Amino acid sequence: MTTPRAKISAFWRRFYGTFLRGDAAQQFDAELEAHVAMDTEAGIKAGLDAAEARRQALLHLGGAEQVRQAYRERRGYVWIEQLLQDIRYGVRALGRTPGFTVTAVLTLGLGIGACTAIFSLVNAVLIRSLPYGDPQRLVYLFTPSSRLKIPEEVICPGYADFYDIKRESKSFADMTTYEQAMLRLAAQGSVQSIGGARVDEDFFSTLQSPPELGRTINAEDNQPSHSKVAVISHALWISMFAGRADVLKQTLQLNGASYQIVGVMPPEFEYPFKTDLPYGDSHIQSTKIWVPLALTPKQKADRDIANNVALARLRPGVSIPQAQAEMGSAMARFDRLYPTEYGDWGALVESFTGISIGPARPLMEMLISTVVLVLLIACGNATNLLLARATGRARELGVRAALGAGRGRMVRQLLTESLLIAFAGGAVGLVLTFLFLRLLPHLDPGNIPRLNESTLNVRVLLVALTVSILTAVMSGVLPAVGVSRMRLTDFLRTHEVTGRGAGHSRLQGILIIAQTAMVVVLLAGAGLLIRSYINVVTVDTGFSQSTLSMNLSLGDRYRQPQAGTAAYFKDLIGKIRALPGVSEAGAVSNLPLSQTESLGTIWIDGFANQDYQTTESRTITPQYFAAMNTPLIAGRDFTDADASSAARPAIVNEKFAKIYFANRNPIGGRVAGDNKHPDWHTIVGVVADIRHTSLEEDPQAQMYSPSFDFSSAFIAVRSSLPSAVAANEIRTMLKSIDPNLTVTDIHTMGDLVSIASARRRFQVSLLTAFATIALLLSLVGLYGLMAYSVNRRTREVGIRMALGAQRVDVLLLILRNAFVLVGAGVVVGLACTWAATQTLKSFLFGVSEHDPVTVVLVCALLILCGLMAALVPARRAASIDPMQALRTE
């Protein structure tokens, strides 16, 4: 049964929720509260306490608090209902103009897709956590010497220095040292080289990386007599053992010995990666096997330079400068106590993340800046489209305003439509991002850390959503606000919204100028990088790019002196040279562009020498220069007899001859390792400079010595056969001689040139692609503005033609307007480019950041493309029938 009080409450809810809005609701609240106060005061005078008096007053008024709550619920429901109504109306409105909708969605989709794609790269390279515990506290330790003119990040503490620092240091919570190694893994009747590392017992604990299965290497394993255990990567576990649960009971055949598997690391752990080290082993992209370092007491006491890496974890609260100061004091003391040949060992502590991802940071920042410009251009285009559409909908919006729609209501409707377009563009952008990530493996230069881990994860999706909302706001606010300022009195008088078309046109023109300016910046940057890339790949390398190269390892044969390694290797080279189609074959200790280097001190007879002069040194076999097609400038090449000659002949490059034999003939000159115990080499030839280290670094002084005594070397082969066929023939012949011979890193020298220029090609490809997208977007925007202008000026054009203007005059009028906009944008863009290209200095090679050729070409391209984009609307204007134009107006 319904009580009178319940009926009163229901009445108040209906009244409050249905009829009261805004100020009326506030007045009702005030009036209701006044009645409650009066009734409460009356109750207090009747002898009730304040709380009971207020309760009775509320009951008397029929549950005012419940009324308020019902009103609040009703208002929330109305807001949601209105939002859904706006969305439904927006979808219908956009569906009525499919051309506009598709253009706007694709425009924003390109901008959002570019932004999301690059963020996925940045997320993988710079943002995502490395698979180590608190990587910000990990540091590399180096001991550079001022006497050796080599990069500071090459020399790590010798083993004795390392263990002394480890024992005395108060800055490091953990320290580890390890060596990279190519391990020969025998499986299923074949031998393959695989990336590995020899690590000490603190390696995994310093990195704070626990195993997925089993355990890691401990102190007992690192005793030389207990060193035959191995930890393998997750990838090797899957590929070799198919993820079997009993993998810890299996063994590996490494370098001819049996190793017991004791652990499996998680999928993300394959340290050290090639990109994690400043000067790592170029053959090792990532590590698949870890075995004990197992140093002997004699090795631990050795203070000579070792082929090791030192890694440490800072204690909480200790900064890198503090740790470096402590390590520097220790090294200075060790220099005094244990003097060595080079001495003067310093201390350098470098951030692990700085070494690993630092070199990639400038490239990522450049790409982020690029896609932000592309996104702004896309927003400008969308704003232009929405402005033109809003002007075209002036009659519709005017009618809505005349029927009582408020300014806020219309702004919300237009913003809702821009949100719908932006979210659709975001969906298109995600599709483009997915396609980009599928293409990425083909663009990966191989020297950007963890680039292949770029994925569409939750973080990337959230960024795409955020960018879509921001894009909707940036592109929708101006049209919405502009329309909301319409003069209703003008509309009611003339049935049109006047005074806004010209304003919209000016704003659209400003947007076109801004877009053009940004495109100039992008095209100029892309042009400079393209010219730099061309300069890099066309530089004189000093060798033939068609030469086939490979790394040949003799396996365990070099451990057996009685096997005659030199004679054996000489025989192998002879058999390679005798293969059909092979014209020349030779070997070298360090191949150009293989990221391997050997430095030695030199002393020149008859030269004003300085202590610790260094030169790049290489050991080669006769005919190596012929195989590489490196020209002989003077003297002669090595012969087979030179490899065992007591005369110790040497060949130097042109740079060596210019530095040390500037005013004399280098042929017959003598070179030694030092002046204390000179073991003279006689120069018998001079060859052309070869770019060994990098395509972008000038060749350094180089000296070559002859030998066949190699345990492992790079083979260079000139053949008339296709490289794949020649490589297969050589591999088959070598395997038939000895299955333990390992052939890896098979490339043409052109492949190595391509690999050496891969990062530059990567950045050029992306920046050029984004600049092209920006150019297309700006041309679409210009075309849209010119088409809108022609439609708006139909009556003006008709009058001009009625008064005698020729079609060519109308055509030139529209093209002149386009030229003014593009020209203004180019001028503004050139000013911006002058400042922006300063940041590209580190990316350029052989070209100035203000290269006039690039600037002229960019300006000419933009003006030409701009006029072509305006040509279709201009021709449409020129074909207007003046009588029809005047009649329809």
Image (cartoon, rainbow, N blue to C red):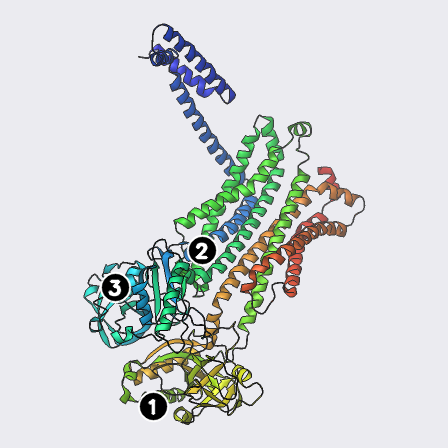
Residue highlighted by disc 1:
567
215 or 206, which is in the foreground? 206
In this view of the protein, can residue 779 be seen by the observer? no
Q: CA distance from mark 2 to mark 1?
A: 52 Å
Q: From the viewer's perspective, is the residue at label 1 or at label 3 nearer?
A: 1
Are dots 1 and 3 in contact, CB under 8 Å? no
Mark number displayed over residue 705: none
Task: Give the residue type that dot 2 points to.
Answer: Val
Q: CA distance from mark 1 to mark 3?
A: 42 Å
Left or right of 252 on screen, residue 6: right
Is the residue marked by circle 2 packed among few (<14), some (14-19), or many (20+) residues within 10 Å? many
Above or below, 884 relative to 144: above
Q: Earlier in the sequence, mark 2 or mark 3?
A: 2
Is the residue marked by circle 1 packed among few (<14), some (14-19), or many (20+) residues within 10 Å? few
Q: What residue is rendered at 25% in x and 76% in y?
A: 189
60 or 616, which is in the foreground? 616
Q: Earlier in the sequence, mark 1 or mark 3?
A: 3
Mark number displayed over residue 242: 3
